Amino acid sequence: MSEELIFRFNVDGDDFTSAGQASVQVKKNLRQLGIDAETIRRVSVAMYEGEINMVIHAGGGVAEVRVTDEYIEIVLDDHGPGIKNIEEAMKAGFSTAPDTIRSLGFGAGMGLPNMKRYTDEMHITSTVGVGTKIVMRVNI
Amino acid sequence: MKISTMRDLLDAKVLCCEDKLGNHVYSAFGCDLMSDVLAFVDNQAVLLSGLVNPQVIRTAVMMDMNCIVFVRSKVPTAEMLELAKESGIVVLCTDKTMYNSCGILYSNGLTGEREAKK
């Protein structure tokens, strides 16, 4: 692959049941590119958790996946409430999700730790009242 | 363990992808918390869950799981079955509880996932 490929998705924040559609599509696209299964899984799980977070906390946003020869980069950008304390949010089990989301199988404070676990690099920038941007890379 | 063997042991109905009953699963994970599934599961595992929403199917897709067993008589929606079909995931449905289902499979040789990844 000489040129990088970019996939861009608008993540709908209104419907929890549709959350994850972009990640499923990315998984399909990466398979078609012949990327190895373990890399695909790491990228799609990290993106899926991020997508779920965007729907739960931020009313949706934009997800972009860049595929280069060396790495796959996932950028998640939202205009939600922002994260007050990133260090605290990164702790396994820390959650501000409502009980309704917990009853749907998420919101147990594993999202951000899972995203970190499955990626080689992860950077969060967030401003309260403005939004959050998460950049993750998985090396190929 | 063959998926068809699981079906027999759990006295389960097959709701989707009957043509793949000959496939094997090598480990199992029972959970209603999808983020834990995403944290702990490895390849070719079966997911046992009592949670019914499309995220259960998408979680299994993300983890390359090839079978989901809905326990406690929980019935997935048509939309969920369509998602499972698209990804070739066999969907079983049993009246047994989570505890009993896991116990039956475990005692017949299908062990659990490895310990939590650090």
Image (spheres, coloured by chain):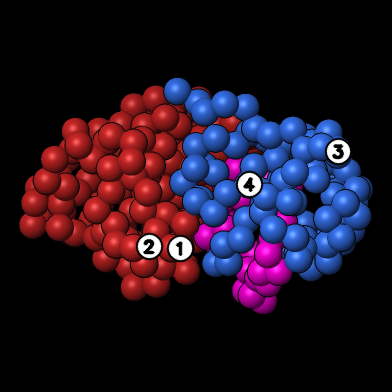
Chain colours: A red, B blue
User: CA–CA distance between discs 4 and 1?
Assistant: 16 Å
User: CA–CA distance between discs 4 and 3?
Assistant: 16 Å
Q: Residue A101 appears at what percent x and percent y?
A: 37, 62
Q: Residue at x 68, y 72 (%)?
A: B75
Amino acid of disc 2: Ile
Q: Does residue B14 show up magenta in the picture?
A: no
The dot on residue A104 is 1
Q: Kindly indicate whether the residues beneath marks 4 and 2 are on one polypeptide chain.
A: no
Q: Residue B17 appears at what percent x and percent y?
A: 81, 61
Q: Residue at x 77, y 38 (%)?
A: B106
Q: Residue at x 28, y 48 (%)?
A: A95
Label 3, residues with CA under 10 Å away: few <14, some 14-19, many ≥20: few
The dot on residue B72 is none
The residue that mark 3 highlights is B108
Q: Residue at x 73, y 51 (%)?
A: B100
Quarter of image, res B8: bottom right
Label 4, residues with CA under 10 Å away: few <14, some 14-19, many ≥20: many
Which chain contains the residue that carries disc 1? A
Q: Residue A44 appears at what percent x and percent y?
A: 50, 44
Amino acid of disc 4: Gly
